[in-house]
Amino acid sequence: MSQQSVVVIGSGLAGYAVARELRKLNSDIPITMLSADHGGFYSKPMLSNALATGKTPAAILNSDAAQMTAQLKIEIHTHTRAQEIDQANKAIKLENGDHLVFSKLVLAVGADPIRLPLSGDAVDDILSVNDLDDYRRFREALEGKKEIAILGAGLIGCEFANDLAGAGYQVRIIDISMQPLGRLLPTEAGKYLHDKLAAAGIQFHLNTQTQSIERRGHRYRLILADDQVIEVDLVLSAVGLRPRTTLAQATGIHVNRGIVTNRFLQTQDASIFALGDCAEVEGKVLPFVMPITHAARAIAATINGTATPVRYPPMPVLVKTPACPTVVSPPDPAVPGSWQIDAQLDGLKALFRDEEGNLQGFALLGEATKEKNAIVSLLPPVIA
């Protein structure tokens, strides 16, 4: 490889966003991407509403690795994993024993699904969806099934539940929280979402958790902490993601909840960057599309010679639950304040104000989502 070369580890939205942004600025710098899977490009957020949009797993894929190679003029190594990073020599050792050298390295390695510590002989049968290959397996497993249990009433759990219910499946959601989207919504908004999803046919088992899962013929028996027993055809886990930090940690790169970076998305090694689900920027781990977009632009500019700190404007999250359209911009948990609730005829507006009365976050549900643009303009940036 050339002396000036960029290696990107990871072929998800974050990895491809950096490659695209850098290519806009520099058509010559060599870019090599390492992909642990097929290396094709697709939009991961589409996985949780593919039934409603009529998308098969094959249709979700926008471009395969060969097409992305031609489109971005980059080199893509599919089914290739980095084993270790040699910071001193700016080299990456691959699992097959080969080495790649770099002038700049971008870690866009994503996150792994959290697995609950359950007992029972069917723990290994629990599915999770974190990429297109996972989703393909999930869709195959759905064939001929009717009753689905989802572990987790967070963003992904609710989106999958709504998508499945809309396609005619009987869905149960189990969560330790008292409400869906417990980490994002105030109590009144959580109840509103619960009632709308329940009206769409989704059954909730809240304030409890799954303790064991056992096979019962072709079905599964779940025993909950409150002694409820549920039998279903398929179990999907959606209890959250944990940033992939193993490679960085083994290299000696600082890791906390994610791979720790400064405002320039640099680790303590200025030639190694991180973004996306694996990164912790200014103490924040933000596993959403909009932060990736802003981070990728900043990294590309910095690599191209213009040191550019990342700035995060207000970045509301659109929850794909058609039974209850929801937009939320959660306040910084470190900011003291209170929620103000406005229950409307066909919606609910919740505004979080700090002790000085400044708007710091919001949740809009139902018809109230139409106010999003006006309210977003009043929010402070996430990182100025």
Image (spheres, grey):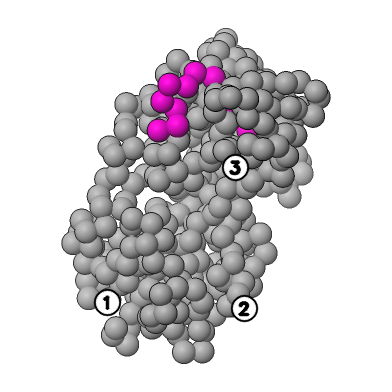
Instruction: Give the residue pinned by disc 3.
Output: 124
Amino acid type for the residue under numbered disc 2: Gly
Instruction: Determine the CA span between mark 1 and mark 2.
Output: 27 Å
Q: Is 340 in front, or is 301?
A: 301
Quadrant into which the C terminus falls: bottom right
Q: Is 18 in front, or is 376?
A: 18
Percent across and percent down for residue 217 are 58, 24
Instruction: Determine the CA span between mark 1 and mark 3.
Output: 44 Å
Above or below, comparing residue 20 to residue 115 in the picture:
below
Which class describes the residues within 10 Å of circle 2: few (<14), some (14-19), or many (20+)?
few
At a point 27% along the width and 37% down the height, the residue shown is: 59
At a point 22% along the width and 71% down the height, the residue shown is: 27
**Callout 3 secondary element:** helix
Amino acid type for the residue under numbered disc 1: Ile
Instruction: Give the residue pinned by disc 2.
Output: 252
Percent across and percent down for residue 374 are 48, 32
At a point 53% along the width and 13% down the height, the residue shown is: 200
Q: Is residue 182 among the parts visible in the rendering?
A: no
Q: Which mark is residue 29?
A: 1
> Are dots 1 and 2 in contact, CB under 8 Å?
no
Instruction: Determine the CA span between mark 2 and mark 3.
Output: 32 Å
Q: Is residue 366 magenta?
A: no
Relative side of 323 to 348, left or right = left
Which range of residues does the magenta coloring cover?
140-151
> Are dots 1 and 3 in contact, CB under 8 Å?
no
